[in-house]
Image (cartoon, rainbow, N blue to C red):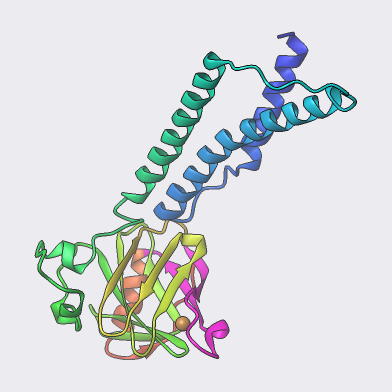
C-alpha cells in the first residue's frame, strides 16, 4: 500500500473511532451495550463495503453480457465463505453473550438469589420476601400511569422521580399494581418489565450525576405515552443527606449537582 493510501486508511479509521463516540458512558450497562454496538459495527462496516464493491463491480462488468454462462463449481471458494461466515457468526454470538451474562445487564432475579430452584415467581410478592443484596436498593412500582419509587432504607417516597446514588451498585426492585409495565432508561442502558404481584430486578451503576429520562416501554393503556419519570443520579453524600432529611415522607428529588 502506498504511503498516501495508508494515510487515508488511517484517517478513515480515526474518523470512524471519533464517530463511534469517545464520550464516557453514563453507566456500566450503557458502556457494555455501546461497546458491543461498536464491535458489531466494526465487523458490519467492512462487510457491507465488500458486498457493495462486488455488486457495483458485477453490475458494471456484466451489464451488456449477451451470453451469460453458469457459474463454475469452486469447492475451495465455497468452503472459504462458509468458514468465514461461521467465524463471523461465532464472533457476533460470543460478543453478544459476553454482554448478556453481565450481572448488570442480566442481574440474578429473586428466585436465583435465594438459590431455591423450586421458588416460583409468585413467592416474592412483598418486600420482606425479597432476598438481601449488597446493593443500594430502590423499589419502583408502576401503575396506570405513574411510577412511584420507595427507598426502604429511610422509607422515603417519590412520584415519577427515581433518585439513585452515583458510582454505587444499585438494585431497582420493580413491581406493578395493575398491568405489565416496563421501566426503560435508555441513557443508563436499563430496561426491565414490571409485573403485578411479583418483583423483578434491574441493576446498574451510574457513573455520571445528572437527570435521565425514564419511560414505560410496555403498552399499558390509554395513558402509556405519558407514563414517564426522571431518574436523578446524585453523589452519594447528597443521596444520604436527602434520605435523612426526608425520612418517612413523600419527597421531591434533590438537584443533580
Ligand atoms: Cu406503563
On screen, residue 202 versus residue 232, left or right, reads left
Residue at the image position 32 percent from the left and 91 percent from the top = 249
- Which residue does the image show at 44% across and 77% down from the upper left? 254
Q: Residue furthest top?
A: 2
Which quarter shows the N terminus? top right
Q: Is residue 210 magenta?
A: yes
Q: On screen, 126 above or below 71? A: below
* Corner quadrant of residue 198: bottom left
* 138 left or right of 207 in image: left
As drawn, 51 above or below 99? above
Give the x, y percent position of residue 40: 53, 40
- Indicate the position of residue 207 as horizontal and vertical percent values: 43, 55
Residue at point 45%, 87% (across, down): 146
Q: Is residue 191 a member of the stretch shown in magenta? A: no
Front-most of residues 179 and 139: 179
Question: Horizontal placement of 126 versus 178: left or right?
Answer: left
Residue 186 picture location, percent across and down: 51, 63
Q: Nearer the viewer, residue 17 or 48?
A: 48
User: Does the image show residue 246?
Assistant: no
- Number of numbered labels in the structure image: 0
Q: Which residues are magenta?
A: 209-235
Of residues 108 and 63, the one nearer the viewer is 63
Which corner quadrant of the image does residue 9 belong to? Answer: top right
Task: Name the residue rendered at 31%, 79% in the picture.
Answer: 243
Side of 229 where 195 appears, left or right = left
Residue 74 in the image, given as x and y percentages of width and height: 58, 15
Amino acid at each position: 500500500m502506498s504511503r498516501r493510501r495508508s494515510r487515508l486508511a488511517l484517517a478513515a479509521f480515526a474518523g470512524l473511532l471519533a464517530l463511534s463516540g469517545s464520550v464516557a458512558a453514563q453507566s456500566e450497562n450503557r458502556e457494555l451495550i455501546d461497546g458491543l454496538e461498536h464491535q458489531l459495527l466494526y465487523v458490519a462496516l467492512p462487510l457491507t463495503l465488500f458486498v457493495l464493491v462486488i455488486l457495483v463491480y458485477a453490475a458494471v462488468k456484466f451489464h451488456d453480457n449477451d451470453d451469460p454462462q453458469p457459474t463454475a463449481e469452486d469447492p475451495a471458494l465455497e468452503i472459504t465463505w462458509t468458514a468465514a461466515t461461521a467465524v463471523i457468526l461465532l464472533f457476533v454470538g460470543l460478543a453478544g453473550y459476553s454482554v448478556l451474562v453481565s450481572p448488570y445487564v442480566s442481574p440474578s432475579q429473586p428466585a436465583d438469589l435465594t438459590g431455591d430452584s423450586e421458588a416460583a415467581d409468585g413467592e416474592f410478592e412483598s418486600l420482606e420476601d425479597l432476598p438481601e443484596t449488597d446493593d443500594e436498593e430502590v423499589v419502583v412500582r408502576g401503575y396506570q400511569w405513574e411510577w412511584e419509587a420507595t427507598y426502604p432504607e429511610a422509607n422515603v417516597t417519590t412520584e415519577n422521580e427515581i433518585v439513585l446514588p452515583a458510582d454505587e451498585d444499585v438494585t431497582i426492585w420493580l413491581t406493578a399494581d395493575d398491568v405489565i409495565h416496563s421501566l426503560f432508561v435508555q441513557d443508563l442502558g436499563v430496561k426491565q418489565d414490571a409485573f403485578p404481584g411479583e418483583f423483578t430486578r434491574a441493576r446498574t451503576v451510574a457513573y455520571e450525576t445528572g437527570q435521565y429520562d425514564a419511560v414505560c416501554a410496555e403498552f399499558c393503556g390509554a395513558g402509556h405515552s405519558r407514563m414517564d419519570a426522571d431518574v436523578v443520579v446524585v453523589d452519594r453524600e447528597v443521596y444520604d443527606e436527602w434520605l435523612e432529611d426526608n425520612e418517612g415522607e413523600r419527597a421531591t428529588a434533590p438537584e443533580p449537582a
